[in-house]
Image: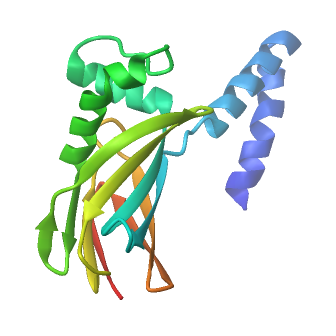
Amino acid sequence: MKYIFLFLLIPFLSQASYGNHDADELRFRESVNITAHKYYLSVSNLKYNAKAGALQMTSRFFIDDLEDVLSARADENIILTEDGNLTKYKQLIGDYFTSRLRIKIDGDLIPIDYLGSEIDNDQLVLYIEIPVDREPLEIEMRFTALMELFEDQKNMVHLKIRGERKTLLMVAKKKIDSVKF
């Protein structure tokens, strides 16, 4: 409680030492420093499609974050929103995500297929398939996308298998998560 009181009191104390204009600027800077924390989270959905014989995964990432990590990898300035660039950089995007995503189904490491992506407002929507011949009993996943860029990146994957919903969460300190159905 004393910290909250002190936090509320700081702007008034600063007004005594500075002119009104400077005190207003200081209050603005203090509020910006406290509230300007970006939250780094990707959300994916994974479900089994019997007709396709695959687990199908859709992932969403903010375009500007992906542009930063891809630009560093390619050593060039990449702008995904420019006409034709999703096609131009499809291989780079696919290589990045296939290197950052590992999936074990019932104990076996399964290769993933990056199908492509599309832009939805300020996000890139990725489409990935994991070929399997049946619904899995256990899924283990390592998903480290953007963790080299943001230490507090979280990659959340919602799964729906046999009508049952579960969620995996990968973070820097726990890059692997698993679930049983």
Position of residue 137 in the picture relative to residue 15 (left or right): left
- Answer whether residue 119 is visible to the viewer in this image: yes
Position of residue 120 in the picture relative to residue 131 (left or right): right
Give the percent coordinates (x, y) of residue 126. 42, 44
Give the percent coordinates (x, y) of residue 80. 44, 21
Q: Quadrant of the C terminus?
A: bottom left
Residue found 31% across the figure and 66% down from its top:
54
Give the percent coordinates (x, y) of residue 94. 27, 38
- Answer whether residue 123 is visible to the viewer in this image: no
Residue found 39% across the figure and 72% down from its top:
48
115 versus 32 height, above or below: below
Give the percent coordinates (x, y) of residue 164. 48, 85
Residue pushed farthest right?
20
Q: Quadrant of the N terminus?
A: bottom right
Between residue 50 and residue 99, name the one nearer to us.
50
Between residue 136 and residue 51, name the one nearer to us.
51
When asked about the image quadrant of residue 22, the answer is: top right
When asked about the image quadrant of residue 88, the answer is: top left
Picture mark count: 0
157 versus 164 height, above or below: above
Residue pushed farthest left?
108
9 versus 25 height, above or below: below
Position of residue 6 in the picture relative to residue 118 (left or right): right
Residue found 76% across the figure and 27% down from its top:
27
